[in-house]
Amino acid sequence: RYKNFLPTPKPITQAVVFCVMDISGSMGNHEKDIAKRFFLLLYFFLQRKYEKIDIVFISHTQDAKEVSEEEFFNSRENGGTVVSSALRLTNEIIKARYSLQDWNVYCAQASDGDNFYNDSAECVKIMENDLLPKLQYMAYLEVKSDDNLLDEFRNSFMGVSYTPTESDLWKAYKTIESKYKNFEMTIGSNRKDIFNAFRKLFSKKEAQ
């Protein structure tokens, strides 16, 4: 006599990937090459899961802006670094263009970790209050330069273990990594590192 209607969850078949990269003076061609490979691996990984993938490119020095793919990977700028500007812009774009009911949102961030004094605390605040509650997954890659590779070789030759220097941004992010299952971080200084880092980060995500 009565019709019963049961809600059926609608699977989300589309995702957006935010690629956020530091392009300040300290990020050279080597660092950008490593970051580019990381972003591409993320894109190919998500292509297997979704029918539609959007990519949003955000680059930043002390200011952040949405850019084209060509500008994202080829621009070279000088100036300081304010990472929070990029995280804030990411959040604004999500709110304006990507409804969480219709999109699964991912973010990959690459930086050498050099950041303006006290801004890393602001980054943590934005991550906890605005971004991480919205994201399916976020990965932070801290890119090390060729100088770090040389240090690693020298220490290896001398029989000394090599430990990369942790930046202020890395230390700040480390305080929240254990709190959120959808946030992980790793360090990479060469192409091999990137593949291994990607497997480490996303094998856990895929298992979930």
Image (cartoon, rainbow, N blue to C red):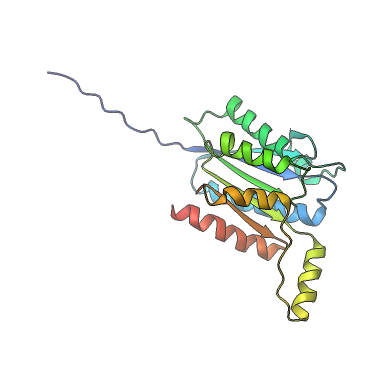
Depicted 72 relative to depicted 101: above or below: below
Q: Give residue 18's position: percent from left, percent from top.
A: 63, 40
Q: Name the quadrant of the N terminus.
A: top left
Quarter-of-image position of residue 59: top right
Q: Nearer the viewer, residue 200 or 127?
A: 127
**Residue 178 picture location, percent across and down:** 53, 52
Answer above or below: position of 63 versus 169.
Answer: above
Q: Which residue appears at 39% of the width and 33% of the height? A: 10
Q: Position of residue 22 (x, y in %)?
A: 76, 45
Position of residue 48 in the picture relative to residue 27 (left or right): left
Count of all numbered marks drawn on residues in the image: 0
Q: Position of residue 199 (x, y in %)?
A: 56, 60
Residue at the limit of the structure toward the top, as seen here: 1
Work out whether 175 lies above or below 191. Answer: above
Q: In which quarter of the image is residue 7?
A: top left
Task: Give left or right: position of 53 versus 58.
Answer: left
Work out which residue is located at the far left of the displayed protein and give it.
Answer: 1
Indicate whether 113 appears above or below 61: below
